[in-house]
Amino acid sequence: MIVKVCGITNAEDAAAAIADGANAIGFNFYAPSPRYIAPQRAAEIPTGNGVRRVGVFVNETRARVEEIARIAGLDVAQLHGEEAVGEYPAAVTVWKAVRVSAGFSLASFADSPAEALLLDGPAGELYGGAGKNFDWSVGQASGLAFRRIILAGGLDGSNVEEAVAVARPWGVDACSRIESAPGKKDHKKMLEFVRAARRALES
C-alpha cells in the first residue's frame, strides 16, 4: 500500500507528510517544473526508514537517472517520458507513469517490468499531471498480470476515498491539490488527503 505525497521541496513539508502517515515522498527532478529540486538539496531532506524516496524524471538518460538516484538516495525512479523498457535504470526500482487519455487500456501494460504503473490525469502538452481527474475505473487491474496501480491526478481529501473504491489501486499520489503554492504544501489539505487515503486503502 502506497500513500505518496509528491512535489516535496523542503524538509518541513516532508516531515509533516510522514507524520501524517505518508509512506512515499516524491522529489521532482524535471528542471522546467515549478516543483524542481536539485539532487543535492533532495539528499539533505530526511525521510527515515520505511519511507520510499521517489524521484520524478522526464526523458533523462539511464545514466543520469542512476546518478541522481545515488546522490539523492532514491528508492524509486518514476518515469514520465517516452523511455523504452531497455532504457530503464538498473540500479533503482521503476514506476512507469502514463497519462490516461481516450483509448487508454491497462492491457497493453500487463507485461511491464516496472514495479508499478502510475496513472496520471491529462496534461495537454505538459509532462506530469495538471491536477485533473480521469475515469478511475480504467485503473481496475482485475484479471491482469499487472496489479500494482498507483492513482494520481487531481486527488485530495475530498475524492481519494471514492477513487480507491472505484479502482482498488495499490497506491495513491497527490501533489497540486494539496498545495498552497507550487512546491509548498498546505499542511491541513495534506493531512486530510493522507488520512482519507490510508482509511480507504486499509479498508
Image (cartoon, helix red, strand yellow):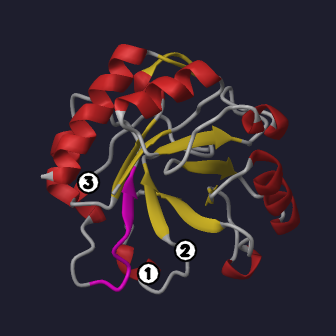
Element under disc 3: helix
Image point (55%, 64%), residue name = 96
Element under disc 1: helix
Image spot of residue 162 (x, y percent): 16, 43
Considering only order in the chain, which callout, 2 or 3, is on the residue closer to the N terminus? Answer: 2
Image point (67%, 59%), residue name = 81
* Marker disc for residue 129: none
The residue indicated by pointer 2 is: 114
The residue indicated by pointer 1 is: 108
Image point (70%, 33%), residue name = 33
Considering only order in the chain, which callout, 2 or 1, is on the residue closer to the N terminus? Answer: 1
Q: Amino acid at mark 2?
A: Ala
Point out the frontmost of discs 3 and 2: 2
Image spot of residue 183 (x, y percent): 60, 23
In which quadrant is the N terminus drawn? bottom left
Circle 1/circle 2 CB separation < 8 Å:
no
Identify the image quadrant of residue 18. Answer: top left
Q: Amino acid at mark 1?
A: Ser
Q: Residues within 10 Å of mark 2 (few under 14, many from 20)?
A: many
Q: Over which residues does the magenta segment extend?
A: 144-151
The residue indicated by pointer 3 is: 136
Predominant secondary structure in magenta? loop
Q: Residues within 10 Å of mark 1 (few under 14, many from 20)?
A: few
Is residue 176 found left or right of 72 in the rendered image? left
Q: Nearer the viewer, residue 74 or 183?
A: 74
